[in-house]
Image (cartoon, rainbow, N blue to C red):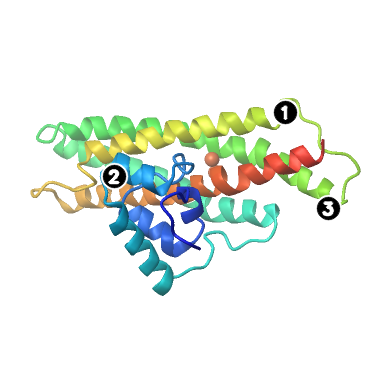
Amino acid sequence: MVITPEIPLKDLASSNASAHVLEDYRFDYCCGGQQSLAEACRSAGHDLQQVMIALDAALALGDTQPVAPTRTLAELIAFIVDTHHAFTRAELPRIQDLVEKVTAHHGERHPELNVVRDAFLALQAELVPHLMKEERILFPYILDFERHRQGESPSPPAACFGSIENPLQQMLSEHEAAGSLLKQLRRLTNDFEAPTDACTTYRSTYRALEALERDLMRHINLENNILFPAARALAADAG
Ligand SMILES: [Fe+2]
Ligand SMILES: [Fe+2]
């Protein structure tokens, strides 16, 4: 991969080494994946040359495996569900317990915790039905399209929602909503930095929120920048 100022963030997010650098600089490479590196640096106030040097070094030395080492959309979907949906489903109730506990104990002294809890609960309410819609409606539909292309079914799948663009747009707008709640959480928690007097549970809660953010960035990147464009191309091919 050649690093240029014009390269879109989504291309940089396609390999582990460069995705890590984007995460270190806190670039939004999933919903903001169309942005060029130069634009992203300008709006975040980062030095473009410095970021390009970090990316070159990471690609020369780091893990340049693709973020989703899969050949077919069926494999990519299985990877997303088994890795990212499973992680989100396991973490949401665990973090909810932590957030409720910390807010009950320290909410009076640290009133920002009440707002953090509300933002987390809004994120959870957004994500739970979102995962279900992908697994029950969109992903099976994409798998049917792939089977049709492979000659395993004579006609393209029929759907009650019209064009594939409708569920894709719906999922994209839900990703935007989740992304803006994650940004809110990062701001409210001072970049997930617990105050100096914070107890262990308080610190664990912030660490868990940051890990959830990181996983969701990778998850949404795979959907927005790899799976959905491929599904759109499949549907266009099928006419
Ligand atoms: Fe997903
Ligand atoms: Fe999604």
The verdict on label 3 being within 8 Å of ligand 1 is no
Q: Which three-letter amino acid code belongs to the residue tagged 1?
A: Ser
Q: Earlier in the sequence, mark 2 or mark 3?
A: 2
Secondary structure of the residue carrying numbered label 2: helix
Q: Which three-letter amino acid code belongs to the residue tagged 3?
A: Gln
Tell me residue 27's x, y (percent).
36, 47
Q: Earlier in the sequence, mark 3 or mark 1?
A: 3
Q: Is residue 90 visible?
A: no
Tell me the residue that label 1 is attached to. Answer: 163
The crowd level at tag 2 (other Cα within 10 Å; few <14, some 14-19, many 20+) is many
Q: Residue furthest bottom?
A: 61
Camera-nearest label, 2 or 3: 3
Tell me the residue that label 2 is attached to. Answer: 98
Say which quarter of the image contains residue 122: top left
Secondary structure of the residue carrying numbered label 1: loop
Q: Is residue 63 visible?
A: yes
The verdict on label 2 being within 8 Å of ligand 1 is no
Depth check, front residue: 183 or 115: 183
Depth check, front residue: 98 or 194: 194
Secondary structure of the residue carrying numbered label 3: loop
Tell me the residue that label 3 is attached to. Answer: 150
* Residue at x 46%, y 62% (from the top left corner): 16
* Residue at x 49%, y 49% (from the top left corner): 10
Q: Is residue 131 left or right of residue 74?
A: left
Q: Are marks 1 and 2 in contact (CB under 8 Å)?
A: no
Q: CA distance from mark 3 to mark 1?
A: 20 Å
Rendered-image quarter of ligand 2: top right
Q: Is residue 175 left or right of residue 71?
A: left
